[in-house]
């Protein structure tokens, strides 16, 4: 899902994203063909930003201003009738939750073990994954390497394999063997990031032979 904040029209638009070859196609969801995901009759409603939250909900930042246009875009005779600072002391944060939502327990990832952080890279919650990845990088615990390598090889979640690949690189323990594994991954995004990381293995302008062979195979991918 892609959520687009349209602060000028006082609404949030949603698109479902699907792949068609190398392209991404955005379409209205079946149940939103003639309506928007979120609208307001309050003309001060100015959605401007979103965030994934630890509880799995989508948080929305509402700037809540009377005038959203830049002063330069307004004619002088119109500006005389407006208070361009109206609402600069206001703002709202909304939590968008599914029906029947129950607040889960608060995650305590700062107290999690390294093994638990690696396991969290498979979470379906983006906030959990990204926070675990950050904490792994901050800790620089070399004991994470075996678990990360296993995750890269065996996880059924493409995002987890992608996180594992970058976590290994972030700890300075990404080796040619892991890169070759990622270059053969079934997921295109993992292969793409592996190609990017392969640049670090160039020595005197030359790739290691096995790595260069694999990269050449991917030229038509």
Image: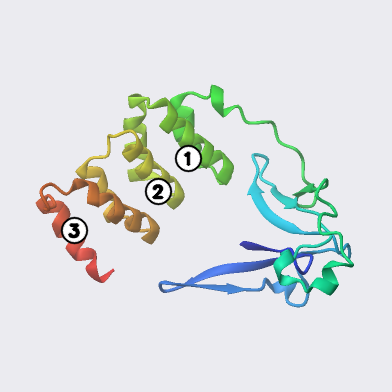
Residue contact between numbered discs 3 and 2, judged by CB atoms under 8 Å: no
How far apart in space, not on screen, are marks 2 and 1 (Cα)? 9 Å
Q: Secondary structure at mark 1?
A: loop
Q: Is residue 79 above or below residue 174?
A: below
Instruction: Tell whether 18 sits left or right of 217.
Output: right
How far apart in space, not on screen, are marks 3 and 2 (Cα)? 18 Å
Question: Split into 4 quadrants, where in the image is the N terminus?
Answer: bottom right
Badge 2 or badge 1: first in the primary sequence: 1
Residue annotated with mark 1: 121
- Judge whether residue 184 can be spotted in this image: no
Residue annotated with mark 2: 162
Give me the residue at 35% from left, 37% from top: 170
The crowd level at tag 3 (other Cα within 10 Å; few <14, some 14-19, many 20+) is: some
The crowd level at tag 1 (other Cα within 10 Å; few <14, some 14-19, many 20+) is: many
Depth check: give the residue in front, 129 or 86: 86
Depth check: give the residue in front, 56 or 40: 40
Residue annotated with mark 3: 214
- Judge whether residue 202 can be spotted in this image: yes
Give me the residue at 38% from left, 58% from top: 187
Question: Split into 4 quadrants, where in the image is the C terminus?
Answer: bottom left
Q: Is residue 58 above or below residue 41?
A: above
Give me the residue at 43% from left, 49% from top: 156
Badge 3 or badge 2: first in the primary sequence: 2
Residue contact between numbered discs 2 and 1, judged by CB atoms under 8 Å: no
- Across and down, in percent, residue 200 comes to 23, 46
């Amino acid at each position: 899902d892609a959520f687009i904040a349209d602060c000028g029209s006082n609404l949030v638009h949603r698109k479902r994203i699907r792949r068609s070859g190398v392209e991404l196609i955005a379409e209205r969801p079946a149940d939103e063909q003639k309506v928007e995901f979120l609208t307001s009759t309050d003309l001060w409603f100015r959605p401007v930003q979103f965030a994934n939250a630890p509880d799995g909900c989508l948080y929305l930042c509402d700037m809540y201003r009377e005038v959203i246009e830049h002063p330069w875009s307004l004619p002088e005779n119109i500006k005389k009738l407006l208070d361009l600072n109206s609402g600069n002391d206001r703002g709202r944060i909304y939590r968008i939750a599914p029906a029947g939502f129950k607040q889960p327990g608060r995650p305590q990832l700062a107290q999690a073990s390294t093994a638990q952080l690696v396991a969290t890279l498979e979470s379906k919650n983006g906030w959990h994954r990204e926070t675990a990845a950050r904490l792994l990088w901050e800790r620089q615990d070399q004991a994470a390497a075996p678990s990360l390598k296993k995750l890269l090889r065996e996880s059924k979640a493409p995002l987890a394999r992608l996180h594992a690949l970058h976590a290994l690189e972030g700890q300075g323990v990404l080796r040619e063997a892991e890169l070759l594994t990622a270059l053969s991954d079934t997921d295109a995004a993992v292969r793409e990031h592996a190609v990017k990381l392969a640049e670090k293995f160039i020595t005197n302008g030359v790739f290691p032979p096995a790595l260069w062979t694999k990269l050449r195979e991917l030229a038509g991918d």
